[in-house]
Image (cartoon, helix red, strand yellow):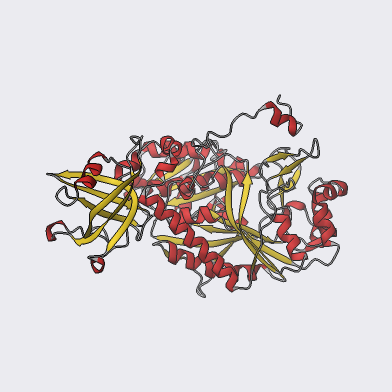
């Protein structure tokens, strides 16, 4: 239906007879001449209808409206010099039409597709008519960019001798840390498949099978509440696994890829590298203590420091009692905070801290002449306050915030305050990309569901540092795992681990978390059985490709990365899902609704 696309023709094509097809972007009537901008995903070409050249074609064009679909035939001619449009690639030419076919008409659109106005349209309306929203050039450009981005990843892994393998979608339930999507079985009443939260067990089984380098662009499914960096229900990750590797081997493979993705698919400059060009590595505990989060944004400094030794015996009971009760006191300097943060800002930051479990947010303003202003000075004492100011290196105009509670509460609350301060003070430089690895995660932590019970801190399939000896001799809360996260500008870009490949170590690791041998066999029998037949040491990781591209492109929401996203409540407004199911369908899978 076309000889060329709407973005293809140039001055060199003048006098050619061509056929184009596309959508009417604009129609303009100029004193008898009708001009139509015909659009497809490749660009836009001006089509001219002259009643003196072809009356019949002109009459058809006179009825045409925006977003109608046309096929036009005609000759490529030069535009008059005064009408050359330097903003588009086809701006030197136009098509003098000899024939036009109205392929399809269009109703009036519910919103404009052109220009800045389209960005102001209510998101729910755009999602309801996503098939129209996708016509916007910026969305199409993003999908094209994503295609090239994924293509480059595939080329990179093939170049490094990896095999792309598709793992099952109908899988078994697995303790990956989120809710499963369950699929009732028609053939086996009362039993269920689960959509994979990740291909974790399958990729480990591939390693046992001798496929020593595997990857795939893997669809993953988790029934978690959506947020700006987490799409509801489904997402894609660059899943990879290698045999006979250490943690450092994974880092050496992934770092060049992430550097090139940053350079090719963003305008950001990579900063914060080690002297040898590698990514910085921070232990989980150091990250929590220093930045208050295990995915720190390192584009700005603003470190948190323990000050227990300075306030242990002070007269400010909030500080001294926290330490006496086994907690900690940490402090954080905000450069220029005393000058730039208002009273309302302090109130906002206090609420942020409370949202992470803190009882409040103490502060000191350092004024000109080193005058200290704070409600806590009279309790803390001027000498102790000045020692704190000296320890943190605070100058006139700076502000110091404090946290006093359990170690975890202090870390989380000051970490949240750090992040909010950076937002308020404009410290999150969008021109920078700072990558880092977070390493040495704790193998175990207390359960969020059953207080006092030991549970896996993160991935249950990670190899504990120290192996069986550590599991048998150490306090579970002191055991570290060969687990690592890759972080970009305050977002978790990937998680991974060196895997537990020993049946004995796996049984023991799960026993500490409260699982019996029978439960492990029932839930992970395939993996346990495979490990009894010569499993190689192996490890890998799984970068979230949608989230990384969102950060590299400075998008407001991960939903912008998807052709057909769910809304902020997990609904597909275009297809009207989730929806009710007929009783017969429920009967087929032996399900009755409560």
Rendering coords of residue 417 (x, y %):
48, 45
* Relative side of 446 to 517, left or right: left
Where residue 79 appears, as percent x and y from the top left, is 17, 59
Query: Would residue 112 be visible to someone looking at this image?
Result: yes
Q: Is residue 591 above or below residue 482?
A: above
- Looking at the picture, tell me which residue is in the foreground, 150 or 421: 150
Residue 412 falls left or right of residue 107? right
- The answer to whether any part of residue 398 appears in the image is no
Dividing the image into 4 quarters, which one contains the C terminus? top right
Identify the residue at the far top of this view. 594
* Residue at 48 percent of width and 68 percent of height: 260
Q: Nearer the viewer, residue 221 or 34?
A: 34
Residue 494 sits in quarter: bottom right
Quadrant for the N terminus, please: bottom left
Task: Give the answer, above or below, for where 493 lies relative to 564.
Answer: below
Q: Nearer the viewer, residue 122 or 254?
A: 122
Lateral position of residue 128 relative to residue 284, left or right: left
| Nearest the eye: 273 or 262 | 262
């Amino acid at each position: 239906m076309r000889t060329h696309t709407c973005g293809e023709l140039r001055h060199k094509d003048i006098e050619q007879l061509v056929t184009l097809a596309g959508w009417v972007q604009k129609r303009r009537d100029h004193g008898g001449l009708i001009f139509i901008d015909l659009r497809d995903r490749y660009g836009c070409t001006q089509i001219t209808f002259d009643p003196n050249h072809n009356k019949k074609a002109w009459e058809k064009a006179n009825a045409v409206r925006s977003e109608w679909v046309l096929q036009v035939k005609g000759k490529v001619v030069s535009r008059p010099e005064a009408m050359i449009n330097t903003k588009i690639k086809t701006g030197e030419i136009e098509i003098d039409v000899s024939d036009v076919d109205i392929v399809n008409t269009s109703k009036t659109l519910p919103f404009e597709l052109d220009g800045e106005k389209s960005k102001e349209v209510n998101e729910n309306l755009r999602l309801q008519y996503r098939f129209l929203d996708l016509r916007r050039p910026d969305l199409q450009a993003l999908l094209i960019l994503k295609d090239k981005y994924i293509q480059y990843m595939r080329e990179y892994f093939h170049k490094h001798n990896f095999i792309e393998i598709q793992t099952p979608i109908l899988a078994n339930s697995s303790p990956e840390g989120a809710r499963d999507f369950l699929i009732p079985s028609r053939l086996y009443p009362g039993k269920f498949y689960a959509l994979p939260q990740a291909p974790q067990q399958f990729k480990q089984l591939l390693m046992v099978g001798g496929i020593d380098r595997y990857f795939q662009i893997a669809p993953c499914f988790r029934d978690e509440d959506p947020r700006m960096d987490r799409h509801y229900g489904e997402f894609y990750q660059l899943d990879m696994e290698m045999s006979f590797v250490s943690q450092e081997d994974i880092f050496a493979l992934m770092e060049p890829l992430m550097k090139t993705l940053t350079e090719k698919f963003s305008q950001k400059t990579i900063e914060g590298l080690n002297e040898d060009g590698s990514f910085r590595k921070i232990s989980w505990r150091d990250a929590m203590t220093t930045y208050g989060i295990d995915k720190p944004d390192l584009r700005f400094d603003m470190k948190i420091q323990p000050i227990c030794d300075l306030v242990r015996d002070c007269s400010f009971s909030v500080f001294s009692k926290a330490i006496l009760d086994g907690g900690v006191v940490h402090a954080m300097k905000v450069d220029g905070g005393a000058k730039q943060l208002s009273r309302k800002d302090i109130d906002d930051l206090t609420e942020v801290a409370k949202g992470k479990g803190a009882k409040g947010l103490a502060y000191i303003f350092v004024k000109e002449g080193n005058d200290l202003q704070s409600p806590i000075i009279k309790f803390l004492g001027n000498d102790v306050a000045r020692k704190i100011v000296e320890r943190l290196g605070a100058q006139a105009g700076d502000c110091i915030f404090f946290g006093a509670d359990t170690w975890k509460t202090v870390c989380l609350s000051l970490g949240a305050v750090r992040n909010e301060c950076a937002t308020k003070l404009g410290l999150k430089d969008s021109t920078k990309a700072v990558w880092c690895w977070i390493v040495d995660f704790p193998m175990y932590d207390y359960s969020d569901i059953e207080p006092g019970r030991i549970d896996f801190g993160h991935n249950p399939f990670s190899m504990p540092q120290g192996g069986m000896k550590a599991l048998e001799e150490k306090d579970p809360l002191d055991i570290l795992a060969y687990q690592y996260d890759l972080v970009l500008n305050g977002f978790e870009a990937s998680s991974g681990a060196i895997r537990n490949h020993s049946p004995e170590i796996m049984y023991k690791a799960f026993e500490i978390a409260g699982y019996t041998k029978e439960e492990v066999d029932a839930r992970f029998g395939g993996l346990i059985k495979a490990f009894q037949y010569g499993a190689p040491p192996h490890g890998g990781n799984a970068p979230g490709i949608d989230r990384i591209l969102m950060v590299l492109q400075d998008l407001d929401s991960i939903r912008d990365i998807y052709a057909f996203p769910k809304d902020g409540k997990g609904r597909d407004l275009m297809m009207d899902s989730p929806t009710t199911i007929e009783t017969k369908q429920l009967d087929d899978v032996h399900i009755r609704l409560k």
